[in-house]
Amino acid sequence: MLDTATRANAAFASPLDVLRGQPLGRIGTLEIRLAANAGEVAAAQELRYKVFYEECGAGRHSAPSTDRRDADRFDDICDHLLVFDTAMPGPRHRQIVGTYRLLGQEAAQKSGGFYSQDEFALDALIDRHPTKRFLELGRSCVLPAYRSKRTIEALWQGIWAYVTQNRVDAMVGCASFHGVQPQAHAEALSYLWHHCRANAEWSVSAVAKRYHRMDLMPLEAVGTKSALLGLPPLIKGYLRVGARIGDGCVIDDDFGTVDVFIVMPVGAIGARYVNYYTGEANRSAG
């Protein structure tokens, strides 16, 4: 079997494709790069299992993993962005403290579609933009001790380097609220509906059979401060860099979450973030 990272690169290659194993960013002792071998991918899957299954209770409707990894068919066609704490003792793959899974459009189309298409009608968006290259972000995961602004910035350094070098036009993916009751997040979901929805050009709807309304409260009843406090940090981070939200949310019973769709046209990302992450990545990797 081909090394996971090699297969992903072959499917999502470009003249400026990222160099395997080379740092894409660095903040203090944190280093960001793509998984270079199957062992590092396995370590990322183990980290995901710790967070999603052991901490958050995912997998309630599926057979338990005997190897204690969160893994599926998409792992073999994705690139895996990793954050290493180089100050940690032990072998390199045991220094992984955060990860993101990156699925390019070419790889997805050759392998049956994007992961999020089971929940959201992504085909319609892609059809409206036939000349643009899409990248799906997923399986965002950071160990509890590293859930800080510094780690998030390290991840974004790596994402931005990847997006730039692979000429990506738009990033998409799901983001989650904990629990399976949309009403428990009524104010936050309503805030996203009223203030953060994508326009017609970039709109994506939840698939009809899984669609749940997000406009659970009228505009005048939504308090901005309390709604923002109710948003998961990942969603707030996406909104800060210019992301918009799709139409409708989806309940993921197996992972125990309420999912919304994130769409980030690269051209809509704020200039200050582009300058910041481009500059930081260049300085760190240089």
Image (tube, helix red, strand yellow):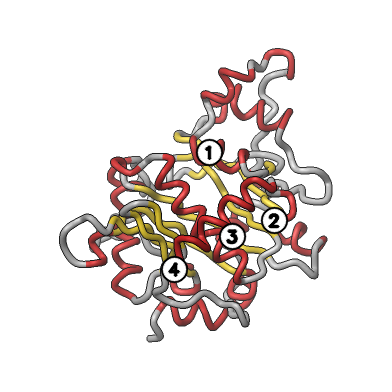
Near-viewer residue (91 or 199): 91
Where residue 43 appears, as percent x and y from the top left, is 29, 64
Which label lies toward us, 4 or 1? 4
Residue 189 in which image quadrant: top right
Where residue 5 appears, as percent x and y from the top left, is 43, 76
Where residue 23 appears, as percent x and y from the top left, is 42, 67
- What secondary structure is marked by label 3? strand
Residue placed furthest toward the top: 221
Near-viewer residue (27 or 53): 27
Q: Residues within 10 Å of mark 2 (few under 14, many from 20)?
A: many
Q: Amino acid at mark 2?
A: Val
Task: Give me the C-alpha separation between circle 1 and circle 2.
Answer: 25 Å
Q: Amino acid at mark 4?
A: Asp
Task: Give me the C-alpha separation between circle 4 and circle 3.
Answer: 13 Å
Numbered badge on residue 258: 1
Numbered badge on residue 266: 2
- What secondary structure is marked by label 2? helix
Task: Give me the C-alpha separation between circle 3 and circle 2.
Answer: 13 Å
Numbered badge on residue 136: 3
Which callout, 3 or 2, points at the residue further toward the start of the chain? 3
Q: Amino acid at mark 1?
A: Val
Which callout, 2 or 4, points at the residue further toward the start of the chain? 4
Q: Which residue is mark 4?
A: 75
Q: Amino acid at mark 3?
A: Glu
Left or right of 169 on screen, residue 175: left
Left or right of 172 on screen, residue 285: left
Which label lies toward us, 4 or 3? 3
Numbered badge on residue 169: none
Name which residue lies at 45% across and 34% down. Answer: 179
Which callout, 4 or 3, points at the residue further toward the start of the chain? 4
Left or right of 110 on screen, residue 122: right
